[in-house]
Image (cartoon, rainbow, N blue to C red):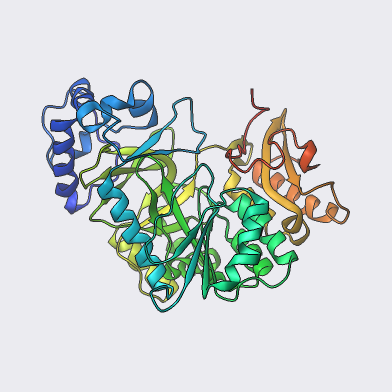
Amino acid sequence: MASPDVRAAPARVHVPVRAACRVRDTVPAYRRHLEAAGLDDISAETWAHVPFTDKATVFGADPAQWAVGGRLANAAEVVCSSGQSGPAVSVGLTSRADQDAMRDRVDAMLASLGAGPDSSSLLVNVLPMGISVPTSIATAATPSVHLEMALHVLSDIAPQFDRVVLVGEPPFLTELSRRWADRGAVHPDLWVVTGGEPVAESWRTYCCSVLGVEPFRVMVSMGVAEVGVHVLNETPQLAHTHRAISAGDPALRPWWNLIRRTDVPRLFTYDPSLLYFETRTHPDGPPTIAVTTLAERDLPLVRYDLGDIGVVLDADDVAALEAQAGIGLPPDIVAVFGRSAHVTGPAGRVYPEQVREWLFALPALAGEATGRFRLLVDGDRLDCHVQVRGSVPGGLSADADTLADRLGDAFGTPAAVRLHDAADYPFHQAGDWTHKARYVGALDA
């Protein structure tokens, strides 16, 4: 039996063991997956040897074989993924019970913001691809990524409500925020929930400055179609801690030794009654996050590698964070750095998450960038192509030079920043808010 490739399993590993046994007994494809790995038994003692699954494993051939009963048609809803991580296309299967539970979680979040029968709330869903955000205590509007309709809802309909909760992905929210602010004052009681790709703290600061709201009003969520649209979430306490460790002593976060990166991860919590997270280590790269779904569902997943670089923090890690931030934190925390795509130079790896943080920290570039860029290695040089709104305006040269200097320092050889007006950017069509941007590599085929 191969040596385990996971960080020391917590004492509560018996919880996912029960879920894995249920999946083994109800999903033939998973039973065959275990047999192929030579595993006859699933227990707390053998958990470290239970094989991982991933997108290619579950969705590479016939995903119906991984559903309970071998049927996709049993689901109440198919949730499509908007990610770009390999040839396999992943989906999520949602049951009626899952829909009810999701609505209850959304309602609980809205209630914490003051929504209820005595205070009207408008939830404006500008997520792409028809992703639903169900609620029973707010009025929902779903303009998706239609800019004109979203602006109409925010400018003409939203003022009739006591509060507005805007849900969307960062690239679209960037442009929507600018255009809404250009029309005049935004709603005085505005909350923003975002995710879909890693969120830079500098982007949050910029977006809040455009909208005129406090940073705590922008909340970050991480969804995974296969698992759910709201799998990991940031709390105000975790957002505060993120800023604290950004300015703190790296020696106070020893768990970063597993990552060997200088940028600061997003800190998320989750519901441990529904999900079990663990750190999967790799001999040839940084660790990734794996999840086991604990509740009964149409598409159960066991040790499913999300592909995101990160670490599940243990009790000592959480205590160290609490001491550094001076604030109480939830006990269940995952530190997520982002996807594994990167470029490598003489000085080390450069990840898109680092570039995004630098991009929105530079005032002129932040005001014009769409948020899309592409890192390309040309010989021994790094080129960063940046998409900006409309035609390339003046006054960006100093910020572009600063970004190039930071890229060059991180990469190890001189770097160049090339600005493209939106229509001429060769890597992503202007006005396309549905497809996820790719940040590393040559022109798409």
Q: Identify the residue at the far bottom of this view.
A: 118
Residue 228, horizontal then vertical, whole percent: 36, 47
| Direction from residue 431 to residue 232 in the image, left or right | left
Q: Which of the two residues, 49 or 110, is positioned nearer the viewer here?
A: 110
Q: What residue do we see at 58% from left, 56% from top? A: 200
- Pick the residue in front: 366 or 39: 366
- The residue depicted at 54 percent of the width and 37 percent of the height is 341
User: Residue 285 placed where, x, y %?
Assistant: 45, 36
Tell me if residue 205 can be seen. Answer: no
Q: Residue at x 36, y 64 (%)?
A: 107
In the displayed structure, 61 sits above or below 276; it is above
Q: x, y (%) of residue 179?
A: 71, 59
Which part of the image, by quadrant, shows the N terminus? top left
Describe residue 202's horizontal placement relative to residue 110 as left or right.
right
**Figure quadrant of residue 60:** top left
Q: Is residue 202 above or below residue 327?
A: above
- Viewer-nearest residue: 424 or 117: 117
Tell me the residue at 21%/47% (across/down): 295
Is residue 339 in sight in this rendering? yes
Q: Is residue 67 left or right of residue 255?
A: left
- Residue 282 in percent (x, y) is at 38, 36
Q: Is residue 204 left or right of residue 234?
A: right
Q: How many marks?
A: 0
Q: Quadrant of the C terminus?
A: top right
Residue 56, placed above or below residue 305: above
